[in-house]
């Protein structure tokens, strides 16, 4: 155990996060809360994209579904947040499972187009089903209160998010180290090999979609409470590229990487808030640059440079069409015959 | 009946544009095995370049088209050099994410150059705007021009692919990259040529379409996803399939918009795609039983 090892750094981060609300102003608390919400999103997406290798584009839509379900259950049905929020997360999970059904028959680029179509369809429903979703203008959600507890709304929501992040982070970290995580990686590296080892493709793909849907749904519910407002444009394609950038910047196939990636990207987003015109260029370039020059992300660099971070990065080394199983372990610099 | 012919004609017109975009996507996918997610952005960027040439600099229509096609080819080559060649042995996820990153850079650049959200640039029509009537059927000349232009581009491309040496090398590389390397084809160049050709077709489509609608930085993605849908409908590796898929998507969209509700126009294509992929995951003309392991 070294001084700057993973466990120590995470402990310090968690402690800082826990005492932060007493020291920072409302704006920084808001940013910190946003980061925590995006940590959830990026862990969920990483399980689907980085571990299971499913090229899915529906995460922003699932985030939106979580936010809309939580908000609409409060506004239209009159449920309190405490009931609407878990229900919203469950609805997003159910949708995640439902879209995994076609995914079981589809692979790679076909999966990409069907999930993209699903994301566009969701966006269209948010915009056009005005009698339920209030259309393009969005709607305000009722302010939540933590009445019996002696905390303000901001601090209360922040702690709620922090607790959920810690719990779901530990859960994800344990899941990917268990039989489930190994099955995900096997599915990513070769579906046929995974099947021949007795991995039930149907079950594990559905599980990966369900997990990512659940994480996105939880994040969506918290996000709607944080903003007190839900509108379609928060869940569009830019949202998708933001989440993809987080996963890549942090490191594909690393849960702790998702944590770092979300922090880095949201900090950059806030720093670039004044130059909105350059945001697309900046995040596109970050995504492209990391893929080209740092394919293992921040976590890859940490692993190489700092002692105590030697968690295996479960990143795919698969080529387009490897000649055989041996190619999986061949270093990428070698020239293909 | 009049409504039906009108809808069919406008569906075929937009469908021909989707078909051209799908062709570009399939050409790249056939040889490299990836989808260029920046394809729609290249389409948009070339269209806006043509707008600058035609409207701001006063170059007449056909030369603008030609220059835009050349610039589109160059953009495609640049895409290949930036986002594909350095990582060509990486997994599909990385390759796709790299082109997505590039797409956002191109879109952001277009916003900086040609205006931010909500700026729509209009391209003057090249034919007279008055409709011609054949009996009861009214036809807008611009639509006929687009349809004819698209068919000419498809034929030119088919001839290039079937008859020229470069086209045959592209076919060979798509068929078996390793074997074509052995017979002396420089596969990297073929990849570059595929990206260039795909983008050049997209540029031609953009300039053809420009007089019919407005140009704006966000149009790239919506056309890309329709073209992608068309390519998938046709099986992703089949050139005739891409054309067929494009026309199908265009006509379905127009009919859904005309007979159900105009807001269904945007979304009908996606519903069709989700349905087709569940029933027939390899598309209409895709190869059955082929699996890349």
Image (spheres, rainbow, N blue to C red):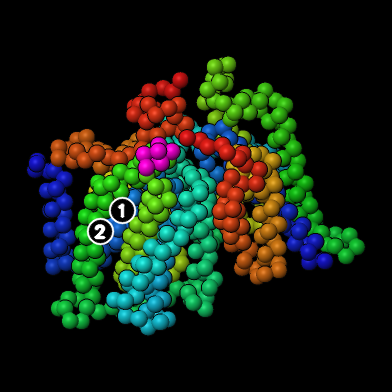
For this view, does B146 lie left or right of residue A33? right
Provide the chain ID for the residue under circle 1.
A
CA–CA distance between discs 2 and 1? 9 Å
Residue drawn 32% across the image and 70% down it = A86
Q: Position of residue B16 (x, y in %)?
A: 70, 49
Residue A35 visible somewhere in the drawing: no
Looking at the image, the residue that sits furthest to the right is B135
Majority SS type along the magenta span: helix
Of the numbered discs in the image, which one, if any, rests on residue A153?
A: none
- Do the residues under discs 2 and 1 have CB atoms within 8 angstroms? yes
Pair 2/1: label in front: 2
Q: Is residue A212 above or below residue B190?
A: below
Dot 1 corresponds to which residue? A43
Q: Where is residue A233 in the image (x, y as percent from the top left)?
A: 45, 64
For this view, does A9 lie left or right of residue A185? left
Q: Do labels 2 and 1 share a chain?
A: yes
Other residues around mark 1 within 10 Å, as few (<14) / some (14–19) / many (≥20) = many
Looking at the image, the residue that sits furthest to the bottom is A78
Element under label 2?
A: helix
Residue A82 visible somewhere in the drawing: yes
Q: Position of residue B281 (x, y in %)?
A: 57, 48
Q: Nearer the viewer, residue A184 or A160?
A: A184
For this view, does B171 lie left or right of residue A36? right
Q: Which of marks 2 and 1 is nearer the N terminus?
A: 1
Dot 2 corresponds to which residue? A168
Which stretch appears magenta? A192-198
Q: Position of residue A75 (x, y in %)?
A: 40, 80
Residue drawn 73% across the image and 54% down it = B12
Q: Which of B234 and B59 is in front in this view?
A: B234
Residue drawn 91% across the image and 63% down it = B135
């Amino acid at each position: 155990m070294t001084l700057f090892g993973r466990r120590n750094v995470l402990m310090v981060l968690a402690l800082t996060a826990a005492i932060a609300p007493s020291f920072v102003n409302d704006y920084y608390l808001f940013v910190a809360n946003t980061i925590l919400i995006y940590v959830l999103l990026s862990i969920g997406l990483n399980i689907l994209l980085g571990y299971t290798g499913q090229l899915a584009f529906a995460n922003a839509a699932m985030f939106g579904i979580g936010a809309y379900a939580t908000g609409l259950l409060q506004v239209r049905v009159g449920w309190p947040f405490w009931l609407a929020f878990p229900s919203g997360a469950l609805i997003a999970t159910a949708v995640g499972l439902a879209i995994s059904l076609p995914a079981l028959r589809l692979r790679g680029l076909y999966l990409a187009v069907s999930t993209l179509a699903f994301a566009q369809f969701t966006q269209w429903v948010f915009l056009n089903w005005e009698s339920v979703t209030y259309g393009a203008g969005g709607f305000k959600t009722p302010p939540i209160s933590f009445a019996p507890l002696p905390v303000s709304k901001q601090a209360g929501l922040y702690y709620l998010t922090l607790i959920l992040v810690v719990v779901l982070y530990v859960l994800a970290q344990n899941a990917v180290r268990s039989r489930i995580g190994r099955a995900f990686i096997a599915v990513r590296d070769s579906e046929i090999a995974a099947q021949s080892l007795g991995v039930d493709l149907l079950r594990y793909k559905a599980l990966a979609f369900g997990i990512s849907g659940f994480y996105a749904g939880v994040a969506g519910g918290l996000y709607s409470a944080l903003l007190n407002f839900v509108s379609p444009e928060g869940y569009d394609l830019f949202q998708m590229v933001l989440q993809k950038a987080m996963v890549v910047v942090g490191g594909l196939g690393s849960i702790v990487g998702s944590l770092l990636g979300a922090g880095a990207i949201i900090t950059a987003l806030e720093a670039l808030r004044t130059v909105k015109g350059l945001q697309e260029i900046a995040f596109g370039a970050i995504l492209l640059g990391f893929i080209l020059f740092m394919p293992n992300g921040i976590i890859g660099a940490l692993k190489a440079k700092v002692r105590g971070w030697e968690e295996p990065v479960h990143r795919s080394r698969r080529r387009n069409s490897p000649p055989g199983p041996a190619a999986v372990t061949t270093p990428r610099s070698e020239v293909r015959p | 009946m009049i409504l039906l012919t009108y809808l069919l004609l406008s569906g075929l017109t937009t469908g021909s544009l989707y078909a051209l975009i799908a062709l570009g996507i399939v050409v790249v996918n056939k040889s490299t095995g990836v989808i260029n997610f920046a394809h729609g952005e290249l389409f948009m960027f070339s269209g806006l370049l043509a707008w600058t040439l035609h409207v701001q600099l006063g170059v007449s229509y056909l030369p603008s088209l030609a220059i835009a096609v050349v610039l589109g080819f160059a953009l495609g080559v640049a895409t290949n050099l930036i986002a594909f060649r350095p990582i060509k042995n990486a997994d599909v996820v990385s390759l796709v994410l790299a082109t997505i990153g590039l797409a956002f850079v191109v879109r952001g650049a277009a916003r900086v150059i040609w205006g931010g959200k909500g700026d729509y640039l209009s391209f003057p029509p090249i034919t007279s705007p008055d409709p011609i009537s054949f009996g009861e059927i009214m036809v807008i000349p611009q639509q006929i021009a687009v349809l004819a232009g698209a068919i000419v581009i498809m034929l030119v491309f088919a001839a290039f692919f079937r008859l020229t040496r470069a086209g045959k090398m592209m076919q060979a590389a798509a068929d078996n990259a390793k074997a074509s390397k052995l017979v002396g084809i420089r596969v990297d160049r073929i990849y570059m040529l595929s990206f260039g050709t795909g983008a050049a077709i997209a540029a031609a489509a953009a300039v053809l379409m420009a007089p019919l609608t407005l140009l704006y930085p966000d149009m790239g993605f919506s056309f890309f996803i329709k073209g992608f849908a068309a390519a998938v409908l046709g099986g992703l590796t089949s050139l005739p399939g891409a054309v067929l898929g494009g026309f199908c998507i265009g006509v379905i969209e127009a009919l859904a918009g005309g007979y159900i509700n105009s807001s269904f126009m945007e979304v009908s294509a996606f519903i069709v795609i989700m349905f087709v992929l569940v029933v027939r995951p390899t598309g209409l003309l895709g190869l059955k039983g082929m699996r890349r392991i």
